[in-house]
C-alpha cells in the first residue's frame, strides 16, 4: 500500500486519525510535513492561502506534505497534531489561533520535531511562531472605503475579539478616516472563523444599517457574495475573492505564506532550524493587495500603489500617532508609531467605530 504525496481528508476525525496511523508511520516519514487547517480548503480564504503555501513546499523542497482540514480548536486539534508527531513528521504547521496551547503541549512530548504555530504569542523550545501584518493591507482598504462610500457607513464582519482581529478593524477605520473624517464603522461578531450562514446574516444586518462598503475577518466568501447580491461594495480577505463578487469586490488583503514555509522546511531538513517569532508584512512579501476593481478611480489606485511602496519601505505606519481610542483617550501621541508590543495587546476600538466590543 503506497502513500500518496497529498492526503486529502474530508472524513470524521476518528477516521482521519486511523488513516494517519495506517499510512503515516514513522518509518515512512523521512521528510513528511504536516499541516492542520481550521476550515475546508475550498477555493478562496484563509485555509486556501495556506494550502497554496503547502503546495509550494512540495514543489520547491520535494518534501511529502499531508494535511487535515476542518479541525476544531480544541481537543480535536491536540489529537491531530499528536498523531502527526507520532508518525514522524519533521515539521508541523498549525494554522489557527486556537491551536496554540494544544500545539505547545504536544511539542513538549516530541522534542525532536519542529512545530510552527501560525498567529498566537507562545514560543517553545521546539515551537516557533509566524504571523502576517494583516493590518497593513487593512489600512489600504480602509482608505479605499473612505473614498468610495456614499453613506459614510462601513461594515465589518469579525470572528473573535483577539488583538489581530482588532488590529484589522482599527487599521480599516483609521485608513478610512484619514481621507473621510465622517466615516464610521459598525462591527458584528460571529464567534466563528468559518460559518457562511452567520457571516451572510451579519453582512445583511450591516447593509440594513446603512453600510455601503463591507469587509470581514472570517474565512468564507459569504460577505463578498452578499455584497454582490445587494449591489454594494466589499473587500475580500485572506485571498482574492473577486470571482464571487465581480462587481462588488474592490480588492482584498491577501496573505502569502509559501516563501516562509519553504524556508522553514529547508532549514528543518538541513538541521539548521531554530524556533523564532516572525511577523511579516509588505517588506517580507507576506501581504499584498489583490488586483483592484476598475470601479476604483485611477488616481485612487495610483495613490494606493504609492502607499504599498511606502509600506514596503517602512515609511508609512498604519498606526502612526495620533492614535485615539473610542473613548477619546490618546493611545499614541503625534510623532510616534505604535510599537509591536502595543499592537499585540490591542483590546479596544479606535475613534470612528460605533459598535462595542463584546465581553
Image (cartoon, rainbow, N blue to C red):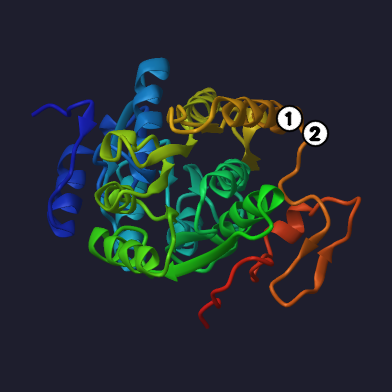
Is 341 rendered above or below residue 20?
A: below
- Tell me if I can see residue 126 in this picture: no
Which mark, residue 310?
A: 1
- Tell me if I can see residue 149 in this picture: yes
- Residue positioned 42% across, 48% down in the render: 95
The one nearer the camera, 41 or 320, is 320
**Residue 218 figure quarter:** bottom left
Is 354 rendered above or below residue 163?
A: below
Secondary structure beneath dot 2 equals loop
- Left or right of 5? Residue 274 is right
The one nearer the camera, 170 or 30, is 170
Determine which residue is flagged by label 2. 315
Label 1–label 2 contact, CB within 8 A: yes
Task: State the separation of the CA atoms marked 1 and 2.
Answer: 5 Å
Secondary structure beneath dot 1 equals helix
Looking at marks 1 and 2 on the same chain, the residue that comes earlier in the sequence is marked by 1
Amino acid at each position: 500500500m503506497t502513500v500518496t504525496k497529498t492526503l486529502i481528508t474530508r472524513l470524521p476525525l476518528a477516521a482521519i486519525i486511523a488513516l494517519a496511523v495506517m499510512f503515516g508511520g514513522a518509518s515512512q516519514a523521512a521528510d513528511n510535513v504536516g499541516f492542520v487547517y481550521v476550515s475546508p480548503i475550498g477555493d478562496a480564504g484563509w485555509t486556501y492561502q495556506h494550502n497554496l503555501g503547502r503546495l509550494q513546499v512540495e514543489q520547491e523542497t520535494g518534501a511529502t506534505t499531508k494535511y487535515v482540514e476542518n479541525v476544531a480548536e480544541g481537543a480535536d486539534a491536540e489529537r491531530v497534531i499528536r498523531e502527526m508527531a507520532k508518525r514522524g513528521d519533521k515539521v508541523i504547521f498549525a494554522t489557527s489561533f486556537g491551536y496554540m496551547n494544544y500545539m505547545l503541549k504536544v511539542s513538549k512530548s516530541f522534542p525532536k520535531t519542529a512545530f510552527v504555530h501560525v498567529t498566537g504569542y507562545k514560543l517553545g523550545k521546539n515551537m516557533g511562531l509566524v504571523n502576517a501584518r494583516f493590518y497593513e493591507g487593512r489600512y489600504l482598504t480602509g482608505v479605499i472605503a473612505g473614498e468610495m462610500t456614499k453613506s459614510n457607513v462601513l461594515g465589518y464582519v469579525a470572528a473573535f475579539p483577539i488583538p489581530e482581529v482588532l488590529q484589522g478593524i482599527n487599521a480599516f477605520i483609521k485608513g478610512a478616516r484619514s481621507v473621510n473624517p465622517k466615516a464610521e464603522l459598525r462591527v458584528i461578531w460571529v464567534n466563528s472563523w468559518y460559518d457562511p450562514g452567520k457571516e451572510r446574516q451579519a453582512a445583511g444586518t450591516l447593509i440594513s444599517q446603512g453600510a455601503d462598503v463591507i469587509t470581514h475577518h472570517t474565512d468564507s466568501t459569504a460577505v463578498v457574495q452578499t455584497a454582490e447580491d445587494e449591489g454594494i461594495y466589499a473587500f475580500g480577505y485572506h485571498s482574492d475573492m473577486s470571482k464571487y463578487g465581480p462587481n462588488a469586490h474592490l480588492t482584498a488583503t491577501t496573505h502569502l505564506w509559501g516563501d516562509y514555509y519553504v524556508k522553514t522546511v529547508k532549514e528543518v531538513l538541513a538541521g539548521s532550524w531554530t524556533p523564532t517569532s516572525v511577523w511579516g508584512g509588505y517588506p517580507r512579501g507576506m501581504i499584498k493587495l489583490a488586483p483592484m476593481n476598475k470601479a476604483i478611480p485611477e488616481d485612487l489606485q495610483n495613490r494606493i500603489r504609492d502607499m504599498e511602496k511606502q509600506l514596503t519601505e517602512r515609511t508609512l505606519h498604519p498606526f502612526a500617532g495620533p492614535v485615539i481610542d473610542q473613548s477619546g483617550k490618546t493611545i499614541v501621541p503625534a510623532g510616534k508609531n505604535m510599537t509591536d508590543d502595543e499592537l499585540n495587546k490591542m483590546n479596544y476600538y479606535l475613534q470612528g467605530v460605533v459598535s462595542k466590543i463584546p465581553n
